[in-house]
Amino acid sequence: MPKPVQAFVALGANLEDPASQVERALPELARLPETRLVARSSLYLTKPVGYTDQPDFINAVAQIETGLSPRTLLECLLEIEQRHGRRREFRNAPRTLDLDLLLYDGLVMHEPGLTLPHPRMHERGFVLLPLLEIAPDCRIPGIGPAAEIRGIDTSGLQALPSPGQAAQSN
């Protein structure tokens, strides 16, 4: 069995109780073969990008350790999306669950259907903020330290309290 590597997955949803969709997907990541969930970010409320006539999103990032290849991991992510009712009607369409493989052990690759690091991840506040929350020293191959990326609009992002935090503040 190959040595496990670190990978990061972005999670997003804006249909059918999006926070619940994302929360239910996190343990599904941990149940993938040869994979364990190392860390997960807070949930972030995010304005839609691209096609804006749709509900706000809930976004998060998970860090996993996996022995799966990048292609096999991507196929597993797509299967989880399908179990959550994901439909791909048009680019940037509303969705029940979106799982994107962001980084895989510093690998740079361009294959049909799989590009690493994920293109545009360094341009998206809804990816960078949760990523930096759990991996402040993260480096994006070809870009550099994620913490040094500047000029990203994060004005539409709001970190949501975890259910435990909300109960404590009452």
Image (spheres, rainbow, N blue to C red):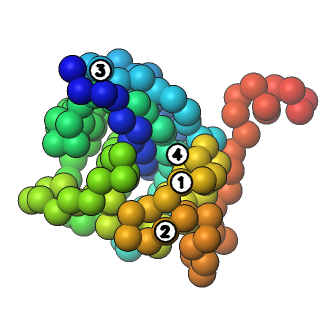
Is residue 113 rendered to the left or right of residue 104? left
Q: Is residue 165 left or right of residue 45?
A: right
Where does the image place residue 34, in percent across and percent down from the top left? Answer: 29, 20
Q: Measured from the top left, where is residue 150 in percent x and y?
A: 61, 78
In this view, the residue in front, 5 or 60, is 5
Residue for point 30% across, 27% down: 3
Mark 2 belongs to which amino acid? Gly
Answer few, some or many: residues within 10 Å of disc 3's Cα (few below 14, many 20 plus, some between 14 and 19).
some
Q: Is residue 53 above or below residue 56?
A: below
Q: Which residue is mark 1?
A: 138
Residue receiving disc 4: 60
Where is residue 35? Give x, y as percent.
35, 24
In the rendered structure, find residue 34 and report the number of the disc placed on it. 3
Across and down, in percent, residue 146 comes to: 55, 63
Secondary structure at badge 1 equals: loop
Disc 3 and disc 2: Cα gap in Å? 29 Å
Marks 2 and 4, the one that precedes in the sequence: 4
Toward the bottom, the furthest residue is 151
Pair 2/4: label in front: 2
State the mark number for residue 144.
2
Q: Is residue 165 visible?
A: yes
